[in-house]
Image (cartoon, rainbow, N blue to C red):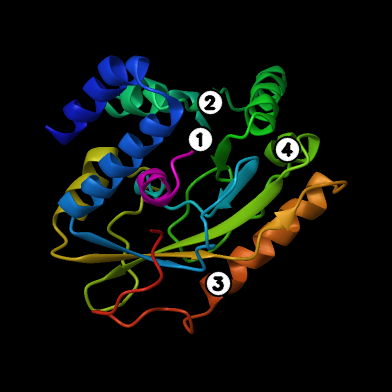
């Protein structure tokens, strides 16, 4: 029912309201989804006043749930694989919120998406990408591909690294949301629904200026920032406590 409500909202309500209202609806719907899944979101390092426009969010990628975690704090336009658009309901939902779909392995299509992403950033949008190019089980961080960072360099914007980690109710690493290898979406969803409580840690590192940078060096710097968070447990909020959340 929640998925159907989201699809109906993007199809019927979005055409009638402005960008600010659409973002508020996306954020509310995503936060409600996390609540339905008994996933408690804890945010560290959220800037006073929130994120400005012309920002490219880069994050590690372990699950389909990552998209909704990010949207629960900062509604964004995502760059995603084109096959996601063909998923029942979920594909319609993420397409309706302005996702930019890319055909992997087609250089010309990457050029098309980069052109659209650059224009969106320059107009003040926030775009989110997963530069690893695929999902992992959370135990490793794959090297970041710099090609999708070129639009924010051209738009002279900023890169915002965000590290996503999933914990069970006892604060231990949870692999329930993993969507890697041959795992099917319904299998991952069933595992998540089976969790009585899940904690999602979202850590923001200091933003990186993209002005005059080379995309390879910028990608490496963002990767190092996220890798440092994933390798550390010092910033893990203790179970049962609240962390800095966006207002």
User: Residue 95, percent across and down?
Assistant: 40, 23
Q: Earlier in the sequence, mark 4 or mark 2?
A: 2
Distance from disc 4 to disc 2, alpha carbons, whole Å, reads 15 Å
The residue indicated by pointer 1 is 78
Question: From which residue to which does the magenta span run?
Answer: 67-77
Distance from disc 4 to disc 3, alpha carbons, whole Å, reads 23 Å
Q: Earlier in the sequence, mark 2 or mark 3?
A: 2
Foreground tag (4 vs 2): 2
Q: Residue at x 69, y 45 (%)?
A: 145
User: Residue 225, percent across and down?
Assistant: 65, 66
Q: Is residue 48 above or below residue 149?
A: below
Per the image, label 1 sits on a secondary structure element best described as: strand
The circle on residue 147 is: 4
User: Residue 53, percent across and down?
Assistant: 60, 41
Circles 4 and 2: CB atoms closer than 8 Å: no
Which of 245 and 160 lies nearest the eye of the viewer? 245
The residue indicated by pointer 2 is 100
The circle on residue 229 is: 3
Q: Quadrant of the C terminus?
A: bottom left
The verdict on residue 234 being magenta is: no
Number of marks in the rendered image: 4
């Amino acid at each position: 029912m929640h998925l159907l409500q989201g699809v109906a909202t993007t199809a019927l309500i979005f055409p009638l309201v402005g960008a600010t209202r659409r973002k508020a609806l996306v954020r509310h719907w995503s936060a409600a989804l996390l609540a339905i899944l008994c996933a408690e979101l804890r945010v560290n390092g959220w800037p006073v006043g929130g994120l400005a426009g012309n920002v490219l969010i880069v994050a590690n990628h372990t699950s389909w749930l990552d998209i909704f975690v990010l949207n629960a704090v900062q509604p964004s336009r995502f760059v995603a694989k084109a096959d996601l658009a063909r998923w029942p309901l979920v594909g319609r939902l993420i397409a309706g919120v302005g996702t930019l779909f890319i055909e992997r392995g087609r250089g010309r299509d990457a050029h098309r998406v980069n052109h659209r992403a650059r224009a969106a950033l320059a107009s003040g949008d926030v775009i989110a990408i997963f530069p690893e190019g695929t999902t992992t089980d959370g135990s490793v961080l794959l090297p970041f591909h710099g090609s999708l960072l070129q639009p924010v360099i051209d738009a002279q914007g900023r890169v915002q690294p965000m590290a996503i980690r999933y914990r069970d109710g006892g604060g231990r690493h949870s692999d329930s949301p993993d969507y890697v290898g041959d795992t099917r979406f319904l299998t991952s969803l069933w595992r998540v629904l089976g969790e009585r409580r899940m904690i999602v840690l979202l850590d923001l590192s200091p933003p990186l200026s993209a002005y005059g940078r080379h995309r390879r060096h910028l990608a490496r710097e963002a990767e190092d920032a996220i890798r440092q968070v994933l390798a550390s447990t010092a910033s893990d909020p203790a179970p049962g406590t609240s962390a800095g959340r966006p207002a």
